[in-house]
């Protein structure tokens, strides 16, 4: 901005509130923490604009010891209309979209200051924003800025860094210095220097390091001249650009009467023989002699600005000017105040060992806290590199063991043979009906899974437990069956709706053949076969079904693989882990049926009336 006299003078106060564009939790929380330390009555963040989000929501944050809800809007217009007292717009948009959002903010009558954090915003767009700000008598800070701060009143985003730095630099109460710089990082360093050599800052601004900042060093020097609480001004410039010459001209013309201590960084550029060298910021580059740090330092000094001989003596020069102003009675050092102590959040307090907290969940099978998930202590990358199968992963996460390959292979075979049994069984039927009702995939799957139980697919655990208990106790197969009959209980794992002794379930035969070739022992399966021989004497369909086959063979697997004690085998059976295999396996088929119905765009299912017996009493 060329005409600094049209700028607003007071940008911030203890009542200033901001609208935050593009939700960033850490900068928002740092602003609220600063508010609390400074004993502000109200939070400085009034609202959040988050594009593509639904208006009416909120984001939680801490304001001291209390948790607050900050409203979220999807448009700048709505946010400014709902929060007319918020006059600062903090823009955390990327360089691609910062222009449009900043321009919209400048057009809102309630917004006075627009802060653009992103760097790399196209220069043409920035020139447009500068022109619009001048037209509306508003101010732009940035782009490529960390923001600004008024000590004890208001700060922008990550300005001044952590809360520890806020305390160290005494930014919780106002001092007497107005500070302006191009660099946000050096601003944080200078706040510390100023806290040691003066009574601290009243206001600090980082205008940003791009070639065309929305407001310049000279703009803010002029503002500082108009603010009564600021008694001296400190400027930290850098090579490149001509802004520091404008400061020198203002001092020469008598427009700036307050003492200025300034330094332009980059004096080492004269050591480089290249025609142009880039120093960090887009605007910090050597080349032309009149934009060099040496030339600008000389111009400032000739104008009457206090310029040290080197950056190393910058702090000493600041202190000398400050002490003289105190001696002359111009500055009455700001009285020290006790800042509010910010409560530590749970994570920080735990990390520092100040508190202990009971956990709510215990996990022994996986860990996601590092760079990659661990399955029973094995990194996922190692699982892939070792070419572990899905059976191996199940053994790690379900049984907490790395089972022998033959055992993992059997688990995979169970998943394959039990994945589907046609559309007519209960689970598939439910899934199909639900899919045809237009429900989502998860609802269709759950509908089918809810049919799994003692009569459909959920008998693996009971079959395994019953066969094992009977054999371990030496109960003959016929006695075992008759005892269950006297108790009014079914023989779990025995019986099928359509399979018979002459039409055996092929899946049972496949698993049996594999077990004969690879299992060290098959005593529980053989016992189940003996039970089948007895039940077939009663009815031709009382065959060993897939539940009984899987259940008995899994007991053999667990008992003979050498990985589990007898007590551990018993615990696995009681936990219901074996039924989990059927649930996992059948989920594959149920998902297939749901997708099949949706793919064919099948209409709503209505059961035919001729398949219903309408009984009357």
Image: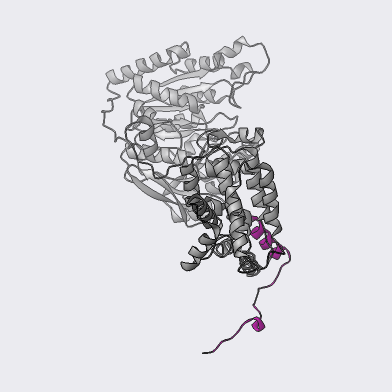
Picture quadrant of residue 501:
bottom right
- Check residue 594 for magenta coloring: yes
Q: Which residue lies furthest to the right in this view?
A: 600
Q: Can the viewer see residue 52 in this picture?
A: no
What colour scheme does the image use?
Answer: one colour
Q: Viewer-proximal residue, 369 or 171?
A: 369
Residue 205 versus residue 476 in the image, above or below: above
Q: Viewer-proximal residue, 588 or 126?
A: 588
Picture quadrant of residue 29:
top left
| Residue 341 point in image, percent of width and height | 30, 35
Q: Viewer-proximal residue, 238 or 72?
A: 72
Is 440 left or right of 574, judged from the image as shown?
right
Q: Measuring 51% from the left and 19% from the top, which residue is drawn there?
A: 264
Residue 162 versus residue 49 in the image, above or below: above
Q: Can the viewer see residue 29 in this picture?
A: yes
| Residue 427 point in image, percent of width and height | 61, 64
- Check residue 439 for magenta coloring: no
Number of marks present in the image shown: 0
Quadrant of the frame with the N terminus: top right
Q: Measuring 60% from the left and 51% from the top, which residue is drawn there?
A: 525
Q: Viewer-proximal residue, 453 or 540?
A: 540
> Which segment did they paint magenta?
588-617
| Residue 268 point in image, percent of width and height | 57, 12
Q: Which residue lies furthest to the bottom in this view?
A: 617
| Residue 352 point in image, percent of width and height | 36, 30
Is 274 left or right of 215, judged from the image as shown?
right
Q: Measuring 61% from the left and 9% from the top, which residue is drawn there?
A: 271
């Amino acid at each position: 901005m060329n005409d600094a006299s049209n700028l607003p003078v007071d940008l911030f106060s203890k009542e200033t509130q901001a609208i935050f564009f593009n939700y960033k939790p850490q900068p928002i929380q740092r602003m609220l923490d600063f508010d609390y330390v400074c004993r502000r009555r109200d939070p400085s963040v009034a609202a959040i604009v988050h594009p593509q989000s639904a208006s009416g929501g909120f984001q939680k944050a801490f304001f001291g010891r209390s948790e607050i809800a900050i409203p979220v809007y999807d448009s700048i217009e709505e946010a400014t209309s709902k929060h007319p007292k918020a006059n600062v717009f903090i823009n955390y948009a990327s360089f691609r979209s910062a222009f449009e959002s900043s321009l919209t903010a400048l057009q809102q009558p309630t917004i006075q200051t627009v802060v653009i954090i992103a760097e790399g915003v196209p220069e043409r767009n920035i020139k447009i924003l500068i022109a619009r700000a001048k037209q509306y008598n508003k101010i732009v800070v940035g782009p490529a800025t960390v923001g600004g701060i008024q000590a004890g009143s208001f700060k922008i985003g990550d300005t001044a860094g952590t809360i520890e730095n806020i305390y160290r630099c005494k930014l919780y109460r106002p001092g007497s210095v107005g500070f302006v710089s191009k660099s946000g990082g050096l601003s944080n360093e200078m706040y510390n220097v100023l806290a040691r050599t003066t009574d601290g800052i009243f206001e600090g601004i980082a205008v940003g390091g791009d070639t065309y900042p929305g407001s310049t060093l000279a703009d803010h020097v002029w503002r500082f001249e108009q603010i009564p609480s600021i008694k001296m001004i400190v400027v930290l410039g850098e090579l490149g650009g001509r802004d520091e010459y404008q400061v020198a001209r203002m001092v020469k013309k008598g427009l700036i009467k307050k003492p200025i201590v300034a330094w332009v960084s980059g004096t080492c550029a004269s050591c480089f023989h290249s025609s142009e060298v880039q120093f960090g910021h887009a605007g910090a580059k050597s080349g032309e002699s009149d934009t060099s740090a040496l030339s600008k330092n000389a111009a400032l000094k000739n104008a009457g600005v206090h310029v040290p001989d080197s950056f190393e003596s910058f702090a000493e020069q600041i202190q000398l000017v400050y002490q003289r102003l105190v001696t002359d009675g111009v500055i009455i050092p700001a009285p020290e105040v006790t800042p509010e102590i910010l409560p530590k959040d749970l994570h920080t307090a735990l990390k520092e060992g100040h508190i202990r907290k009971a956990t709510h969940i215990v996990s022994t099978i996986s860990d996601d806290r590092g760079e990659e998930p661990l399955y029973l202590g094995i990194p996922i990358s190692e699982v892939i590199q070792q070419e572990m199968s899905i059976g191996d992963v199940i053994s790690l996460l379900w049984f907490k063991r790395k089972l022998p390959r033959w055992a993992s292979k059997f688990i995979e075979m169970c998943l394959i043979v039990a994945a589907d049994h046609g559309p007519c069984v209960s689970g598939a039927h439910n899934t199909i009906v639900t899919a045809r009702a237009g429900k989502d995939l998860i609802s269709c799957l759950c509908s089918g899974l809810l049919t799994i139980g003692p009569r459909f697919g959920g008998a693996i655990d009971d079959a395994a437990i019953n066969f094992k208990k009977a054999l371990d106790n030496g109960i003959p197969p016929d006695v075992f069956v008759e005892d269950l009959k006297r108790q009014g209980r079914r023989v779990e794992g025995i019986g099928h709706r359509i399979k018979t002794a002459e039409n055996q379930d092929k899946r049972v035969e496949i698993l049996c053949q594999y077990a004969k070739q690879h299992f060290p022992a098959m005593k529980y399966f053989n016992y189940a076969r003996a039970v089948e021989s007895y039940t077939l004497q009663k009815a031709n369909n009382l065959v060993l079904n897939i539940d009984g086959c899987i259940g008995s063979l899994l007991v053999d697997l667990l008992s003979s693989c050498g990985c589990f004690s007898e007590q551990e085998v018993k615990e696995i059976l009681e936990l219901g882990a074996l039924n989990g295999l059927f649930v996992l396996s059948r989920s594959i088929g149920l998902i297939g049926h749901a997708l099949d119905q949706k793919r064919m765009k099948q209409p709503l299912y209505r059961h035919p009336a001729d398949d219903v017996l309408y009984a009357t009493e």
